[in-house]
Image (spheres, rainbow, N blue to C red):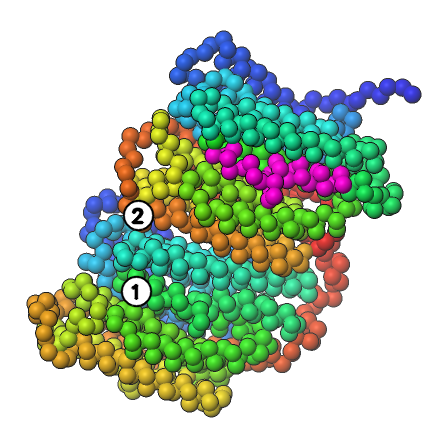
Amino acid sequence: MGITVPQINFSIIAPELIISGFALMVLLLGVFFPRTGKNDYLGYVSLVGIVVAFLYTFPIMGKSQYAFNNMIAADGFGVFFKVIFLIIAFLTVLISIGYSRRVDIDFGEYYALIMFATLGMMLMAAGTSLITIFLGLETMSIAIYVLAGLMRGDRKSIESALKYFLLGAFATGFLLYGMALIYGSTGTIILEEIAAYIKSKPELLRSPMIIIGIALLTIGFGFKVATVPFHMWTPDVYEGAPTSITAFMATGVKAAGFAGFIRVFFSALGAFQPDWIAIMWFLAVATMTVGNVVAIAQTNIKRMLAYSSIAHAGYILVAFVAGNKLGTASILFYLLVYAFMNIGAFTVVILLGKREEENVLISDYAGIGFKYPLLGASMTVFMLSMAGIPPLGGFMGKFYIFSAAVRAEYYWLAVIGVLNSAISVYYYLRVTVLMYFREPEREITGLTFSPASVIAVIISVWGVLYMGIFPSDILALAQRSITVLL
Amino acid sequence: MDHLLSIIIFLPIVGVLVLLFINKENHSAIRVVAFVFSLVEFILSLPLFFLFNNATHEMQFQEVVPWIESYGITYHLGIDGISLLLVLLTTFLTVLCILSSWSAITVRVKEYMISFLFLETGMVGALVALDLVLFYVFWEVMLIPMYLLIGVWGDPKRRIYAAIKFFIYTMAGSVLMLVAILALYFFNLKATGIHTFNVLELYETVIPVGTQYWLFAAFAVAFAIKVPMFPFHTWLPDAHTEAPTAGSVILAGVLLKMGTYGFIRFAMPLFPNAAMAFLPLICILAIIGIIYGAMVSMMQADLKRLVAFSSVSHLGYVMLGMFALNMQGVEGSVYQMLNHGISTGSLFLLVGMVYERRHTRMISDFGGLSKVMPVFAAIFMIVTLSSIGLPGTNGFVGEFLILLGAFRSKIVYGVVAATGVILGAAYMLWMFQRVMFGELKNPENMKLKDLNMREIATMVPMVLLIFVMGVYPKLFFTKMDVSVDHFLKGFKAKYEMKGEAPTPRLTSILTVESVRERVSPSSGTN
């Protein structure tokens, strides 16, 4: 038996390589040219890296190529997600430029870790073997654990990092054990080979080992995307982490989690769909309902957005249950629009704070609408979009998701979903109620708006509006992207 | 002229953009610009009336532009005789509303006018949209500005509660409608292979009766909340009472009509068998609304609340007439939609005028106002009589036709509903007597000024319309005769298919499988 040399094709992982290169460069720049309080330039270097990586996604668009013994693919699905991650990373770095200086975490590691996390996310989406996906997930997670605790002087930040790390490690164990069981049953780690093996041996469909493996994978991925009942960490971690990182987690980690989730379940475990759909149905209902109902009771806007992000994971699970092409495409659409509206909302949260005074209580928003009209209008756009009011992107996302559920004839799931979306209106509107209907209890003055963050808000508003008014191109793109899976 | 409807929809948005560039302290410029835009809007909507072809039931002034092609969603506009009249009512009332806000709104004038113009876009859009998704979008777009109008410029005491209640109620109903819209779309797709949300095409789809029940129920709840029908009416008194005057006018005048319009345009023609099955329930709820609304009105101490509850009663008539399902009933019902917009709109305006002077709306605070405000009292009298339905005013024509239709459909409905007319006269006249006549005891009332020129100018068009519509209703009936007739015929024809006949369209030759091949989203569970 000879040793097969894996075919090496660096061009299909060019975006990943570029991101890694820039991450290392920023790390070194931060060490050799530290400028206390003036490290914004590191952010700009990171932005350049992200844009270059983005440009290198164009050559691999529209074709399906595999490399490294089929461990990695550059297919429509992976590339679509890579673009989402790069957009998220771009916006995160943009909002970090002013904010990281404010909270004294503007050293090279900060930006480097964001890029390493992005690298992990991209590997997760591109990975076509269990090992690649796992490595991607770990790269991402470890970077995020550190980022969450980067504000060393802040108790909440440290609590957040520790909690996330302990629970995350625990969940990773589940995931890895699940992967091991599936490998044990099928003898391969390549997703498509797993599917082919299961197809050739129908008796495996009853194998307890593989079914337990699927359950463990569900727990592992469910933790990363924050579904109920694996969501307990979310509010505390989101609240304690630096706000820019919270935005990054709520959008990037969630999207990456779903990328891996979809890839593994649809490419490798499609034969078990009837089994896992029953579980997902309940997960979706529980996630939406708990997320939305508990969000109503929150007084801290970061916690409220944390619970809202749980609820959004629930909506995405609805499309997951639907399991058809439309559903999968709508997940991609939703994750993109969710990135815009959620990062946008967190950017407003950042802009409303200043040094030593973060103003993260929802009651701090009283009167903002008339005092800072454009900031208030942007926040209103994000809130209404998350609530699913047309003609904003969030509505179109939900429209696609629920249409997938109706299409697959999960009428009750769709009804529970839309009623949840009506419940969510209450807490999203509460922010606008405060912004426009109430007089401020205390004056918030002396805000300085970092231009980079303002640009992030503008991009986010544009994204939400564009995807709401002209959704068809992006949906068509998403539909083309998922043809590799189904 | 090809894009007249689009122009009418988006002109207010242009107005919003212009307003953005005006200094927010310059209140008079803001008012003038908003007024001019609403007036131009109204003038632009007049050609719809004059160029309208009375002889055809086809949708007119149609515009079709693809929007989301993979779903077959189009930007499809068009009007028939029914929506024509409601569009005119909308553009007409908006002018008067902006005029009436001139001195009533003194804070955040710019934001107020922006909200109002946005609202107009939403309302007109919902009335002329022929694509279900487009309709849904405009339907929801109306919510936000109305919510802001109530919440920001409403009565400080309970405005937030009223605004949120209004929003959540309407939203909860409409999301269910969204699921029904999607279910209808996929049903049609399966049956015919055509991607369409075009309501005119969906009229043709034959739906099994069992499915119709669910879909109709979802649509009907959404619209019944908006109408509002008993027992979904509880948001209305709060929203109406707390909203600023112009907000109440537009809420009563146009937004409530969206519910009844939804029934006549969507829920009934799409699901006739279900509509027939639910008919007794809806008629009984409508009659309960008529009687209950009138009785609760009688007991109100607050003028605005009284008018609000009278809306529940009046809209009960509209629903009853519509579900009489004969020419008289439906025409009366559409006519009553216009009447209610004008007479209840006028009542809210008048209550607003006296509130601006006295800052109270309690009936017990007034008395003998006719002595100090003769012009006000005279106009109030005319509007009151119109609301009661005195012959010679518009209200009579509508109520008479509705009752006639109800008698023809089922005599019990007619008899019970007719008692509502008596109750209506009772609460309105009793209120009028307590406010206008009697001794002028309260010293604060002695110095009240009568209406100024702007206020008279606001009311004169209303009074004129009350008489024109009362004396010469033909002007309006000729516009809607053919459309209403077509509505009834279409309803009957589809009803008789009973949802059993095979789908009559050519495309049904294609098997469902081949359709699924062609259609990108794959089906269901595997």
State yes or no: discs 2 and 1 in contact (Cβ < 8 Å).
no
**A308 in relation to B394, above or below:** above
Q: Is residue A100 above or below residue A235?
A: above
Which x, y percent locates residue A69?
Answer: 78, 26
Horizontal and vertical percent for residue B447? 7, 67
Q: Residue at x 77, y 29 (%)?
A: A70
Relative depth, front residue between A171 and B313: A171
Could you tell me which chain the residue with mark 1 belongs to?
B
B493 vs A47, left or right, is right
Q: Chain of mark 2?
A: A
- Indicate which disc residue B374 carries: none
Dominant secondary structure of the magenta stretch? helix
Q: Is residue A374 among what the camera can see?
A: no
Q: Is residue A361 visible?
A: yes
Q: Is residue A229 magenta?
A: yes
Quarter of the figure with residue A213: top right
Picture residue at 46% right of the left edge, 89% below the top: B412
Measure the C-alpha gap from mark 2 to mark 1.
Answer: 19 Å
Pointers 2 and 1 within a single chain: no
Report the front residue among B410 and B53. B410
Q: Which mark is residue B241?
A: 1
Q: How many marks?
A: 2
Give the extent of the magenta segment.
A212-239
- Image position of B480 (left or right of A139): left
Type of residue at label 1? Answer: Thr
